[in-house]
Image (tube, rainbow, N blue to C red):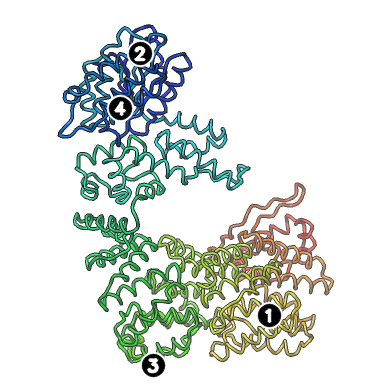
Amino acid sequence: MRVGGLMAPVDHSIAFERLDSIFSESWEGRGQLALIRGGPGCGKTELLRTFMQHAAAMGALSVSATASRVESELQAGLIDQFLRSVELPAGTAKRVDRLISLGMRRERGGSGFGKILQHTAPMVQEVCRILLALSQPRPVVIAVDDVQFADHASLQILFYLARRIRSVRVLIVLTEWDWTQSTTSSLRSELTRCPYHLIDIGPLSDRATADLVTRSLGSETGAELAADVYQLTRGNPLLVKALIEDHKRAEREQGVTRQADRDQSPAVDTGFGEAIIGCLHRWGGPVLDVAQGIAVFGDQSDPELIGRLVNVHRNDAEQAMRTLRAAGLLTDRRLPHPVAETAALSPFDPCERSALHLRAAKLLYQRGAAAIEVARQVIAADQVPDVWATTVLRTAAEQALAGNDVAMAVRCLETALYGAVDKEDRLAITTSLVRALWRVNPSATAPYIPALQAALYDGTLPARDVVSVVRYSVWNGDTSTEESLWRALCGSSYSDDIKLSVELRLAYQWYYGSERGRFGGSKTAIAIGAEPWSRAADHLEAVWNREESDTATDSAERILRSCRLGDSTVEVVAFAVLVLARGDKLERASWWCEQLLEEAQHHGAVVWQMLLGSLRAMISLRRGKVLVAMAQAEEALGLLSAQNWGVMIGCPLATLVSAYTAAGRYDAAAALLRQKVPESMFGTVHGLHYLYARGHYHLATDRVLAAVSDFQQCGRLMQEWSLDIASLVPWRSSLSEAYLKLGRTKVARDLVQQQLKSTRTLDSRVKGISLRVLAACSDLSQRTALLRQAVECLETAGDRIELTRALEELSEVYQQLNEFDRARLLARRAAQESKACHSGAPPMHRPSADHSPEPHQAPPRPPHTEAPDAPVLSDAQRRVAELAALGHTNQEISRRLYITVSTVEQHLTRVFRKLGVQSRNDLPLILSDVS
């Protein structure tokens, strides 16, 4: 019967105080029996050890023993430990040895106190007399750890003794697992006949865990790690201490001395794993088996599955799971950390682990578990036992891709391919694997592409995978393979697939800027050019014709709204966004880039992200956002190694070199240009952009002849490809600038005039650049008008970089004409635009045409703050006044600001009144004073 105790698990400090109180009673001559009960690993042994040290320090004789599962059949084994832990008189020691030798034998044919007593009664009585005699000179504390493993003879002696200590100074303290089994059932039966104190303890509380971590690692580190340590251990003292030691070891090895360098999570290493192994092997039996089953099944763990896997009865599996949870080794349905799972399975060699995972896969498959869960076990087994496993792996790969887990899909398909025998199955798996790999690691597809190329040649490759094969060849610049693939495609059934043909056409436009004659003879192009998809592709090509650019941008918007981002469409949507940018719809192009990038990130498709990220950076630079473009291009380049970019490397490199050059970071640009690029890149439009960017770097650093060479190569390639489109790469104006530096003004003028004549393919940006360069080739008297036109064009285009250059050059012209007020005003505006270029600020002047305000509505501007005594002009009034000061007529101001002439007149009237001027000729000087 129990005479006292605590019903709910208590904190270790409270349990210690309770033991100390019981010890005081025994000290007074009232012998006591205490049972400390708790789950494995909750700190019973540590509590008992601490208490025994305390009792010894108080003057008591400490007699202790630890029961063990492996010695549970060795009768009187605990008593042997007891009596060998104290000094006995020589005669007594000999008598004890003889008695214990008599009792130490294994019993066959059953066990129990009655049967043991028939053989050991003299030993029981004699040992008890010896132990009681020890309490005469001083109190005795007898401790047994893990009494659930005690042999029956030792238990008989303990309880024989317990019934005779009521009036002696003896305290018996036992620790026991909170676990129902035959040994502890017998223990319970005997305990009910004796008064005893029950102390239930649990793991450390979160607060006690935090205190221990803080005492061990210091207050600062302890505060950071305590919550995570508790989460991993659930207060198991052994595991808490193991994590503390792991963290100390990690800090010593890494030399962590500053808070900024610390990883603010506990180091989980060998110490934690060894503690897990120690716990599991100490507990042994079903607890170890079930822990190993949990390590295999993970989130799928349940008593029935685990029982079938490790041959444990369901009830025992349930009890073992409760024990593990109480010990902090089971969180939800998993072991607390991958290190714990590795530790649990460490007794198995690789073949045994493989067999275990394969058996788990079959159990899950038979139960009808999700394919992805069965696949995890097959992958872990690293073998495919039968057709059912291949089918499961393929299904799991589809589910993984649907869930945007590309890495899991790749693992499933690689394992499935390893086990597939049927030729059709292998082709289907290979095509799926190439699609999945392409999203994250294009270079990894190389071993599988030849099989797909062979299937394309013999007509067995599914149409949806044709784009994958062609893309691989184009991406890697393998022109010979690409040409042979096109020969195979011509006249085949693939050319009847309209959507496939359109996807290939637009992908070619993305890489090459044109179809290069690939599609002119296809049955699709000839027979069904009026089909909506084919018609949309035709309209996109009209972007190079300024008279039809609206048709192209409208078609691009329709494609972007209709075409989902996917493995075969990423170049299609990228080209559609590019068409918007080329058509001066920069805001829309930027918006679509952000939407598509978000979708690519959601899908975990790194290649989509790097392609769209490069395009986003290109558009940002086109808008004059130098620092933004720089950051975006750097981000895109960092997504994958250079070898994975193929010919696409030219796109982000060109943008980044141009951004570095515009920012004056010539060393950074030079470092990029030293990076090796594939020669085949120069056969694509991305190579053209790279040459153009490199040429401008050479021009900015006075390597004029090198710049001439790059710009000439641009022109030569574009003419060879019948792609001499100024709005794609305005090489003539750039070459003209180079010739100007060499003093060849006539050649420079002829080149830029030739570019200006290409009116059908000249957008507002290239026209503005061309007019600025033409002004530099012209007499001073002609430059003002040319540069004012250039400024107007570049404002329309929204290119701040080129607008800044035009404003600066116009300011210099006014300076040479002695119109200093206008020169200062323009210089100030150029400085503002330059600052905006390098800060990513919103436009300071008119917005781009595709996002113009309504009539009579001024574009939004940041608030303007004047000096206290200066006249205050509104933003709208200031814009009108600045343009008027530069000599623009009311009609020109109306067109440029998208307001009516009447509104211009009203603004000027108010400006004249506020500034006290009579005409617009006075505006440059006055505005200079109030700016």
Distance in Å between CA atoms under marks 4 and 2: 18 Å
Distance in Å between CA atoms under marks 3 and 2: 105 Å
Q: Residue at point 75% right, 77% down?
A: 784
Type of amino acid at the residue the image marks with label 2: Val
Within-10-Å neighbours for mark 2: few <14, some 14–19, many 20+: many
Q: Quadrant of residue 685?
A: bottom right
Pair 3/4: label in front: 4
- Label located before the other in sequence (3 or 4): 4
In this image, 22 relative to 799: left or right?
left
Within-10-Å neighbours for mark 4: few <14, some 14–19, many 20+: many
Type of amino acid at the residue the image marks with label 3: Gly
Distance in Å between CA atoms under marks 1 and 2: 108 Å
Residue 771 is tagged as: 1
Residue 147 is tagged as: 4
Q: Is residue 764 above or below residue 856?
A: below
In this image, 154 relative to 258: left or right?
left
Residue 521 is tagged as: 3
Q: Is residue 467 visible?
A: yes
Q: Is residue 891 visible?
A: no
| SS for dot 1 | helix
| SS for dot 4 | helix
| SS for dot 2 | strand
Distance in Å between CA atoms under marks 3 and 4: 89 Å
Pair 1/2: label in front: 2
Q: Residue at point 16% right, 32% down?
A: 110
Pair 3/2: label in front: 2
